Image (cartoon, rainbow, N blue to C red):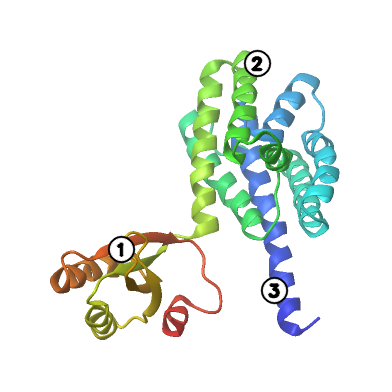
Amino acid sequence: MTNKKFKDRFIEFLFLTLGPLIAAFALEIFLVPNNIIDGGIVGISIITEYLTKGNLGLIIFLLNLPFFFLAFNKIGKHFVFRTFYAILMLSLGVNFFHINHFSLTSDLLLVTVFGGIILGAGVGLVLKNNGAMDGTEILSLVLSKKIGVTVGECIMFFNVFIYTAAGFIFGFEKALYSVLTYFIAYKVIDIVVEGFNTSKSVRIISNKYEEIGRTLISELEIGVTYIKAKGGYSGDDKTIIYCVMSRLELAKLKEITAEIDPSAFISIVDVHESFGGSFKKYRDKI
């Protein structure tokens, strides 16, 4: 293993350790003491722990075990190993914070908001480093291929039953706070995985592509690529301008294009990840 690969692997497992511990902190310090639950297997585990007075960390680990075997056959051993490690760290972290328990607040709104933010940050770190902390995600991935629905729809289906059960056990006010916690955590996960600075990839179709391309290069100092294409209706040869930029540069691009060719067609797509160096270096390679 090269030094770079070793460093990357070390950083990956550092975050696979830190993420579950952050999530465990959110669970034991904010959510569980106030009967606010998460979705998925963690939510089922919290309900089970409340009814049986068992060990929450052990319950989380045991309920996730069947999904390791499912993931091994369907997704791959590397993902399973990372997920196994992350859930093990979550279980140990939950027990650690339970033993060393302290309560920051009992205000349900503060518990919901900060618990959701911290939980989402922990889960996001795990997802960003190619792991998972909930077996329902694995089950949903498998079921989505078999029954023709999306992974998100499967997860939502499971969570409807989980939060309904929480309503009967903890009260529907607590269940509603739990749904709010899940929503906040979900949004924070997106931020952690995708980042704040979502870039944009832009495609411009215009007969004045050379003039537009030169102006973009000179005024915005970005790289552009010309892609040869053919019109499906007209059959005419076309040239598409392709470039990647920040959101702040997008308004200027629209202005430049409109001035040169008001009839130009512009397609804009979010770029959540780019590889091969920093954003600036990536643009310079285009």
Front-lying residue, 127 or 231 = 231
Q: In this view, does 248 lie above or below 179?
A: below
| Earlier-in-chain disc, 3 versus 1 | 3
Badge 2 amino acid: Ile
Q: How crowded is mark 2: few (under 14 residues within 10 Å), some or many (20 or more)?
A: some
Locate residue 2 relative to residue 173 in the image: left or right: right
| Label 3 – label 1 distance at C-alpha | 50 Å
Residue under the point 79% across and 60% down:
78
Q: How crowded is mark 3: few (under 14 residues within 10 Å), some or many (20 or more)?
A: few
| Label 2 – label 1 distance at C-alpha | 64 Å
Badge 1 amino acid: Ser
The secondary structure type at the circle numbered 3 is helix
Residue 234's tag is 1
Q: Where is residue 258 in the image (x, y as percent from the top left)?
A: 17, 67
Q: Where is residue 184 in the image (x, y as percent from the top left)?
A: 49, 40
Badge 3 amino acid: Asp
Q: Position of residue 274 (x, y in %)?
A: 51, 70
